[in-house]
Amino acid sequence: MMKPDPDKPSGQDGARVRDKNPAGSFHDNPVIYHLMTDRFHNSQPGRPASYGRLSDATEIGAFHGGNFSGISAKIKAGWFTRLGVNGILMTAPYEQIHGWVAAANGEFRYEAYHGYWVLDYTLVDDNFGSADDLAELVATAHAAGIRIILDIVIGHAGYPDLLTMSEYLPEIVQAGWKAATPQQYDCYLNYDNPRLQDWWGVEWVRAKLPSYLGGGDDDLSRLVYDMPKFRTESDVPVSLPTFLKNKPGSKAVDLPDAAVRDYLVHWLTAWVRQYGIDGFRCDSAKHVELPVWQKLKAAATVALQQWQQGNLPASDEKSPFWMTGEVFGNGIEKNIYFEHGFDNLINFQFQEELKNIFQDRDMADAYDRSLALHRLDKLYFRYATVLCAPAAHNVLSYISSHDTELFDREKLIDGGTALLLAPGGVQIFYGDETGRHAGPFTPSDMAQATRSDMNWQAMDERVLHHWRRLGMFRSRHVAIARGVHNKLCDEPYIFSRQHQASGDSVVIVIGGEGEMKIDVGTCFAEGEVLRDAYSTQKITMTDGHVTLDMMNGLILLERS
């Protein structure tokens, strides 16, 4: 089998094949690549961490150095294009708390490398690069036809860590705090000091702190992992927290008659207005009131339109702002979130469903393979029934994520096939396409294992080649995402997807080997020249059949 050059943006394995089959809109056929900026690619090795952070890439909870420029470099090299990706989901770029907090049970020093512990929404976090670096990233992505989606938080603020408090509220920390260890971290924070009111303040957040309103017992008021919760439910106008008013360089200003949620919406949509951000993934969506999400979507839509008017030629197509959400446990059914600004929701069920299909199955064994593919077809049919056109809602399915676990590294060929041929939208987690191995973790935080550094020097090129062929094929065909699913044969497993509105059709064969005569049903016309996108063979349909050699147990038929 040929070995693909992972950084070659053109050529037979990498070029976008231009054919008459419509790819569909981004809303209908999103192929999202989810990366953690800090763990993806460091374009400046040896660059020290910002704000006095740990600067130790061997610490599982520390910043490791990945940056905006590293993502830009991989866009320019064609990494995402060759996977068929049309959207990159990246860590929120805004400034995070500066120091570390103690992980559960004091197991390690935990910094905000993931972007979920905001300090200042108005500034870029220096660890990721500069504002100019971010602008270049977005422009580079747009030039490649790729949207940029930010992983945003509106429900909670970052913890009051020792380093940040020493900078802005030094009265809060005890002398000798730099000697703190995770086991006795809290001993150095003076929780009884009244200056804690000058942090976010009681009007801004609920918090597990003296004089602050504590968390409640429902999803909209509880403190998730004891994080300070923004009071998005409040209608009371507020002024800026004292620490933000006095924070050097902050662009935060008082807004007239603005409640907490108004500030948050204003700050988040400023990234859209300034940089042309195309969408948001809304973290912990069920912990924020639905009208707040609707307000954010409306404001972001206007902000993107304003950016487009000032930065795109009048003749260019103007894509609408797009929003997906993390609603833990959500599946494929339409629900009330789609009535409050969401175009899409993350599908938490696919990973476990696929794990159950392939668990303890040897795909080299004929019986095991037949049983697994039978179950996969039932899943595909169920998904397509709910998500095929004219359904207006959509989901993102994944096989690995930063909050759960990595898919079995020994089954990434089968996992990639199942994911990239699934109805609806799909989300590729960084390193699933290269066989990135799990990293270290602790008993209380096993999810840390999913966030290891990208394995640029030790890629599984067989897996990479497979994912590229499938991703490129998917990117050309709205029928895969929104088409009617029809099983044509049990053994080998053959199915079609047909999208009536566009006329797009594909026929896919999974399993088998050698020369195969395939009945393609009514998907293509007699005498039509077809192409197997996996092997690149071209064949002509004769008497409702095509005959060709199968490569690596997969055939992806499309119009040539």
Image: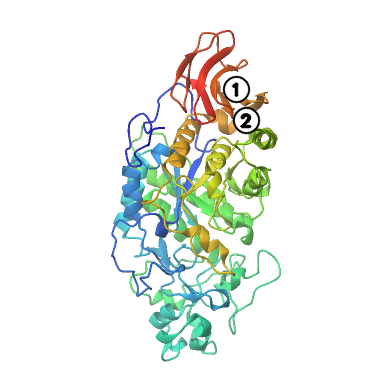
Whole-angstrom CA distance, mark 1 to mark 2, is 8 Å
The amino acid beneath tag 2 is: Ala
Is residue 161 at all visible to an observer of this figure?
yes
Look at the picture and state if 502 lies above or below 56: above
In the displayed structure image, the side of residue 350 where residue 464 appears, left or right: left
- Mark 1 near mark 2, Cβ–Cβ under 8 Å? yes
Above-or-below relation of 404 to 443: above
Q: Which residue is mark 1?
A: 500
Q: Earlier in the sequence, mark 1 or mark 2?
A: 2
Q: Is residue 342 left or right of residue 532?
A: right
The quarter of the picture where residue 365 lies is: top right
Mark 1: secondary structure: loop
Quadrant of the rendered image containing residue 155? bottom right
Left or right relative to 501: residue 35: left
- The residue located at (35%, 58%) in the rendering is 67
Give the residue at the far front of this rendering.
Answer: 365
How far from the left and from the top, in percent, is residue 73?
31, 48
Q: Which mark is residue 389?
A: 2
Question: Label 2: few (<14), some or many (≥20) within 10 Å?
Answer: some
At a point 68% along the width and 43% down the height, the residue shown is: 333
Q: Quadrant of the C terminus?
A: top left
| Front-most of residues 243 and 487 | 487
How crowded pointer 1 is (Cα within 10 Å; few <14, some 14-19, many 20+) is rated as some
Disc marking residue 60:
none
Check the image and report above or below for 136 versus 522: below
Q: Secondary structure at mark 2?
A: loop
Identify whether 53 is placed above or below 264: below
Query: Which quadrant of the rendered structure holds the N terminus?
Result: top left
> The residue under label 1 is which amino acid type?
Gln
Q: Nearer the viewer, residue 438 or 336?
A: 438
